[in-house]
């Protein structure tokens, strides 16, 4: 399953690595080198998405430059034309005041689950940060439970763990070779405890006691979505105990999430598809606002979803014709949104 915050993280001090004429260029080249390691170990594929920030050297550390959603082309010089443009614009904006520089790569990736290859828009995130003239640090975040002895529902997954955990260990070794440093595992998270080789094995307890998906992930996702739509009128109830009817929200061929309703409980909402990354949550703000508007106009949840079938949300996607489906519970739909 894919989470909204990292399952675990590791940090390296950069003692060796790609050079560059500026701090941001060095960060970009280091991030791209890490991506190459991920790709070579079959843990990343396709085009990652970049983001950058430059803060001032003064005590206030003011943001001098910030950019998100930058297209990155692996194998192209400095990540392709959009990144080269970013480097130029960042240098112009920062001038001689450059202090802390950061560059992020959101990496699409894949893992094996019961013999099936699963893909996600954000399997890993690479964060490279450096002060002007310093070598900097590399931090790797992962958002999948594929590396763990138990899934986020607390159930043992020996085959999935055996297929994926060695690949994560190889990734960590590869970044150590690149940076010249050993990984510093991050603090324990809601989901697991990182180690220098991957993750600690979880205890063999009652799955309900290890169900970090229901205990932590579901409340966090709901909070994140409702905060994004906080300025809208109050919407329908966001929980139901019975069956739910849902429709797939897609942008092109990319599934972003699922719009659902349970008319009997006057409930409706949106479940982000974790594998789509932040785009799934950004789309959720749009659809929750439309649901709140429909409730304010007196529509039932079922009427609201039928009305929204004709809405084009542009970047937030649209409801996929013919994708109407029923789930036996909201929990089943949430599992689907987190797993697929």
Image (spheres, rainbow, N blue to C red):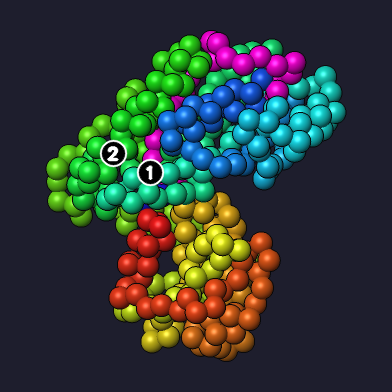
Q: Pick whichever, 78 or 292, lies toward us.
A: 78
In the image, 184: left or right of 64?
Answer: left
Q: Residue at x 49, y 33 (%)?
A: 39
Does any portion of residue 97 appear in the rendered image?
yes
Compare residues 93 and 306 and report the one nearer the observer: 306
**145 shown above or below 8:** below
Above-or-below relation of 303 to 200 = below
From mark 1 to mark 2, how far is it between C-alphas? 8 Å
Q: In the rendered structure, which segment of residues is drawn in magenta?
A: 3-25
State yes or no: residue 68 in magenta: no
Depth order, front residue of 248/296? 248
Mark 1: secondary structure: strand
Residue 66, x across and y down, in percent: 72, 38
Decide: marks 1, 2 in contact (CB < 8 A)?
A: yes
- Can residue 59 be seen here? no
Q: Quadrant of residue 337?
A: bottom left
In the foreground, 240 or 2: 2
């Amino acid at each position: 399953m894919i989470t909204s915050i990292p399952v675990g993280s590791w940090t390296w001090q950069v003692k060796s690595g790609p050079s560059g004429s500026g701090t941001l260029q060095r960060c970009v080249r280091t991030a791209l080198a890490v991506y190459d390691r991920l790709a070579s170990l079959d843990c990343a594929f396709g085009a990652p998405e970049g983001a950058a920030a430059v803060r001032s050297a003064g005590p206030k550390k003011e943001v001098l430059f910030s950019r998100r959603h930058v297209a990155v082309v692996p194998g192209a010089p400095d990540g392709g034309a959009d990144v080269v443009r970013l480097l130029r614009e960042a240098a112009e904006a920062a001038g001689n005041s450059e202090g802390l520089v950061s560059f992020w790569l959101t990496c699409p990736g894949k893992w094996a689950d019961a013999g099936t290859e699963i893909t996600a828009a954000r399997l890993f995130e690479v964060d490279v940060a450096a002060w002007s003239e310093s070598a900097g640090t590399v931090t790797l975040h992962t958002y999948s439970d594929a590396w763990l002895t138990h899934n986020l529902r607390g159930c043992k997954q020996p085959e999935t763990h055996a297929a994926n955990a060695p690949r994560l260990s190889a990734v960590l070794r590869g970044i150590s070779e690149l940076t010249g440093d050993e990984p510093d595992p991050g603090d324990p998270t809601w989901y697991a405890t990182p180690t220098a080789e991957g993750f600690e094995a979880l205890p063999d307890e009652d799955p309900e006691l290890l169900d970090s998906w229901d205990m932590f992930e579901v409340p966090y996702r709901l909070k994140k979505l409702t905060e994004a739509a906080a300025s809208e009128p109050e919407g329908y109830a966001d929980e139901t105990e019975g069956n739910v009817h849902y429709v797939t929200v897609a942008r092109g061929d990319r599934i972003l999430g699922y719009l659902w309703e349970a008319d009997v409980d006057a409930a409706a909402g949106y479940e982000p598809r974790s594998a789509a990354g932040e785009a799934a949550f950004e789309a959720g703000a749009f659809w929750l606002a439309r649901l709140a508007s429909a409730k304010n106009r007196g529509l039932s949840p079922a009427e609201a979803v039928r009305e929204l079938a004709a809405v084009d949300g542009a970047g937030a996607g649209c409801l996929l014709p013919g994708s109407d489906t029923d789930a036996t519970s909201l929990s089943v739909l949430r599992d689907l949104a987190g797993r697929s």
